[in-house]
Amino acid sequence: MMALRVQCFGNFDVFTPSGEHVRFKRSKAKEVFAYLVHRHGSSCTTREIYAAIFEDMPYLEKQQNLLQTYIYAMIKSLKEIGAESVVVRSYNSLAVNPDLLDCDYYRFCELDPGAVNAYDREYMNQYYWADFLYNGF
């Protein structure tokens, strides 16, 4: 599989190798993927994902079921473009395989000059949790 291109600087977005937008049918499914990308391959539990995308809401069964719906929608969107292997799943945890992503944030962390120069102090602007979780580079 060719790498998906992931844009974290500015607004978060995902593109196929041919440059087309990856269509997530639910905005929260895209947000779950953004959170996994942010974690840079570290696995996280569904409870951690829940805490990030539902902010201050208590961990209730109704919301837990909703999160599972978003995860399923994320996987389905990736599967439609043949990229479901980007997400690594195990019991109660998810991660991305960073080797299957061409990501500006990952390249920035590796001190790639193009990515460093592209960074304009904006990171996943549309997600509330990103303001608090990124390290300010």
Image: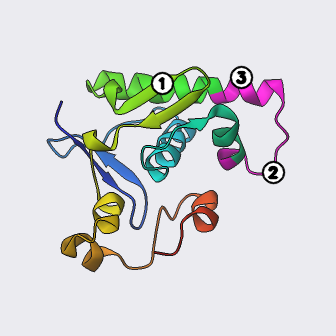
Q: How many marks?
A: 3
Q: Above or below — where is 104 with respect to 18?
A: below
User: What SS does tag 1 mark?
Assistant: strand
The answer to which quarter of the image holds residue 77 is: top left
Rendering quarter of residue 104 = bottom left
Side of 133 relative to 47 (left or right):
left
- Mark 1 — residue? 89
For badge 1, the amino acid type reads: Arg
Q: What secondary structure is marked by label 3? A: helix
Is 32 on the left or on the right of 40, as rendered? Answer: right
Mark 3 Cα shell of 10 Å, populated few (<14), some (14-19), many (≥20): few
Q: CA distance from mark 1 to mark 3?
A: 17 Å
The disc, 2 or 3, on the residue closer to the chain's N-terminal end is: 2
Secondary structure found at label 2: loop
Kindly identify the residue that appears in the image at 54 percent across and 28 percent down. Answer: 71
Q: Which residue is mark 2?
A: 56
| Image location (x, y in percent) of residue 132 | 64, 66
Residue at x 34% of width, y 22% of height: 79
Q: Which mark is residue 65?
A: 3
Q: Is residue 50 above or below residue 75?
A: below
Task: Tell me if residue 61 is in the magenta stretch.
Answer: yes
Q: Quadrant of the C terminus?
A: bottom left
Q: Say which amino acid is labelled 3.
A: Asn
What residue span does the magenta drawing correspond to?
52-67
